[in-house]
Image (spheres, rainbow, N blue to C red):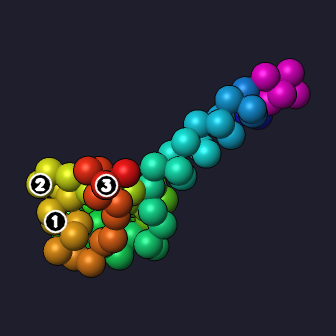
Amino acid sequence: MLLDDCIVRLWTPQVRALDARYKAGTVDDDGVALDRSHRLPGPDLWRRRHPRILTGDLGRSLCSAGAVGADPDRT
């Protein structure tokens, strides 16, 4: 089903703003670090990025797989 022009015009700025926030909070590594530490089925595009700030168990796993992030205590 295609969206009509009114809906597209209404939602496009909001979707772009959310996309920009997601990109600002993540690092694009083509999915290398996440695939090494957490195998997930399917070609989901969000997996190509990992969090910019790496903390907790996931952060340790990603760091051990080569991910680079910002230290939350230094920002």
Tell me where residue 58 sits by quadrant: bottom left
Residue 65 visible in the snapshot: yes
Residues drawn in magenta:
4-10
- Which residue is the extreme one toward the right? 5
- Label ID, residue 57: 2
Which residue is at 75% across, 33% downward? 12
Amino acid on which disc 3 is placed: Arg
Question: Considering only vertical position in the picture, is 5 above or below 34?
Answer: above
Amino acid on which disc 1 is placed: Ser
Question: Considering only vertical position in the picture, is 21 above or below 23?
Answer: above
Q: CA distance from mark 1 to mark 2?
A: 6 Å
- Image position, residue 75 (x, y; %): 37, 51
**Local crowd size for mark 1, using a 10 Å CA cut-off: few (<14), some (14–19), many (≥20):** some
- Image position, residue 28 (x, y; %): 48, 66
| Label located before the other in sequence (3 or 1) | 1
| Label located before the other in sequence (2 or 3) | 2
Which residue is at 29% across, 50% downward? 72
Residue that carries the numbered disc 1 in the rendered image: 61
Q: Is residue 6 magenta?
A: yes
- Label ID, residue 74: 3
- Image position, residue 17 (x, y; %): 65, 36
* Contact? badges 3 and 1 (CB < 8 Å): no
